[in-house]
Amino acid sequence: MTRRIVEIELRRSAALWIGVLAAAVGWVMTADAERWDGLWMTTVLVHHNIQWAIWPLALAAGAWQGRRDRAAGMTELLTSTPRPGAGRMAPLAVVVAGCLAGGYALSLLDGLARAMLAASYQPPGWYWPILVGALGVTAAAVLGLGLGQLMPSRLTAPLLAVGALVAIAVPQLLWEDTGARALLLIPGYLGPTDDYSAVAWRSVAGQTAWFVALAATGWALLVTGTRRRRLLAVLPAALGLALAVSVLPAVDRAAPRDPLAVELVCADGTPRVCVTRLYEPVLPQLVEPARRALATLGRLPQPPTALVQETGQYGTPVEQRRDTVHLSLTVLGDGTISTGAGSTEEGILDGAGTWKCGAADDDADAWNRIDAARAAAGLWLQGATAAPEVLWTPVRELADQALVTLGTLPVEVQVARVAAMRDAALQCRPDLYDVLTTTT
Amino acid sequence: MVGTDKTAPTTYAWPVRAQELRLRAGRHTAVDGLDLALGTGVHGLLGPNGAGKTTLIRALATVLPPVSGQLEIIGQPVHGGGDLRPVRRALGYLPQDFGYYRRFTVREFVEYVAWLKEMPPGAVPGAVQRAIDRVGLTSRAGSKMRTLSGGMLRRVGIAQAIVSDPTVLLLDEPTVGLDPEQRMGVRAMLRDLGRDSCVVVATHVVEDVAAVCTDVVLLDQGRLVFQGVPADLAAAAATDPRANGDSEIERGYSVLMRHHREQGGRQ
């Protein structure tokens, strides 16, 4: 019989449509044509993060359904029936929360299928962020039902949606820098993440405790009639908050790197060409141009003899080995690799096989000179005499000047200059352009 | 389950029994010191607006807790709170303001109420069909509630109240919005139901009382003015030449009310 009631609620409440809406919104927000499908965990984490939008939606949808009894004037009749509040509300709660959580989870179906087809590396525990996210949406729906029942005004749902958005956005704007672990109570928030991130079990446990507690509070509000018991409904949320805060890790450890994902995988043969396990599917694309570039770099004294994908953040200083090219590798949405503006080989030769670093983020002039020196070194190695049109004008002009300057020098001096620039770049020094163009 | 309830010997003398019952509607005392015992049959609750009819029905429906006094439904005290579920299983209730879920069909709505009444699942489909047939909505069973007219909604209200074959059936203004033919149908149904359950009908319509009630309860300002068979009410008309009204029952009603008020609302 209860199954029949669930069927009726499913057919007659707005739950199914709201579930479809959640799935559509989730799909649109998770999909990114420019992201490589093989970034399995990144897709999952983006999907986890869109809770910032789905959570308020679920809260409002729950509240709208929760006011139904009062809006319909059914309270009088319902009070006279024997079925207790919990039993009576269960089918509606199951239907509303189930449709929303199901819609949210299903919105990842496309991304997940793409990841499975494109990736060879399956991150361990990749499903946890999805499960915790679905639990969060469930909690929002049940809490919404409870609050809607408590305050059966038409305004409750929109106000709750706005309130939830504010509660999600404002702490992130104001206190993100503090790294307070309480930030991890925000639905969808896992601190800073990158392609290699996995989710710490403490994050999963803490967020689970928090969402279960919120759902319990919502449920208590939904099924208890008396004012005193409703006050007690705050208890689960308070307990869950305390438990969650004691379990949650520091924000910068909420989503640490997966050590398996960053392990290097190398192509057969020499010279050695390696990428992280995460990028293994694109290794075949890289091997040929990488070995050609390494051969070209052989003109320099003490040249690099291997190429390795660098996992450090682009543009930040990393510890570089002289005998290894630290490559910044990106995979485009269509699955092809990109190492910079031109071909893969050009990208590797940029900076004579060094990592781009040396200036502060916002110091555009310093970056222009660094970029120009790196471009000029790469062009010189390829025997070019002018920078390609695609380069940004100030950089192109500087690079052209550097090439002209180099061209006036004897060949062995040219080699020495480029080698010196390479030395400077290995140390992330900012004066690459001067090293390349000025006689010392 | 319903079957055993029906065949089991009753352990109470009156399905509804009130002693010194005091009820409040908001801050205002709506029923004051009422003694009442209702047996099997159709009881018409009559009285002017504000007499306390709806307040009394709400208390009988266990929605409004009494301020003081005693109230027993099917032999179970309901004035002290406690577990009301056995009592509520035996109740059918049509509130004065009958709310409903607009998107539900008639059948779904009556099924929903049957589920709320904790009827045995196997008995529900048959009981729902019978209730819908009885109020003459068979052809509209699949219609959404929001497409129904006022009279149809009132009949759905009656259908949901009778679906569980209640021992105590409480109907607040069941014939509002019904056309004469439908009204006659409802009267016939009430007569039928009154054979083995306690039906309490609050109404303004004196003819309804004359036509179907086995017992009349006259209330004014929260106090009992008269309780007896309709014939006694009609007979009261002859006791006072100032009686007015179009029928004997109406004249009896007006006489009893006037006497009651002349005595300052005291019996």
Image: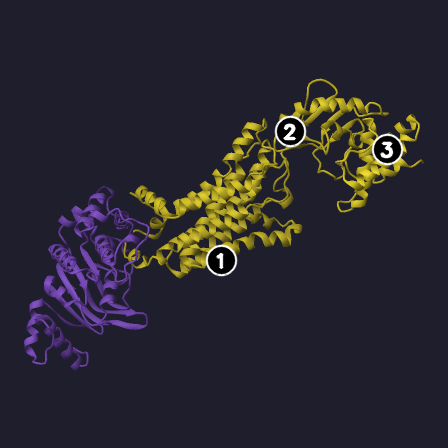
Q: Position of residue B212 (x, y in %)?
A: 11, 61
Return the x and y of residue B157 as percentages of the image width and height: 24, 56
Drawing shade for chain A:
yellow
Q: Foreground residue, A52 or A186?
A: A52
Would residue A302 be visible to someone looking at this image?
yes
Q: The chain coloured purple carries which letter?
A: B
Amino acid found under the numbered disc labelled 3: Leu
- Tag 3 subunit: A
Quick one: label 2 or label 1, which is nearer the N terminus? 1
Which numbered disc covers residue A403? 3
Quadrant into which the N terminus of chain A falls: top left
Q: Name the residue under label 2.
A: A336
Query: Reading the chain from its start, which is encountered first: label 3 or label 1?
Result: 1
In the rendered image, which quarter contains the C terminus of chain A?
top right
User: Which comes before the other along the chain, label 3 or label 2?
Assistant: 2
Q: Which amino acid does label 2 sit on?
A: Thr
According to the picture, the residue beneath numbered tag 1 turns out to be A159
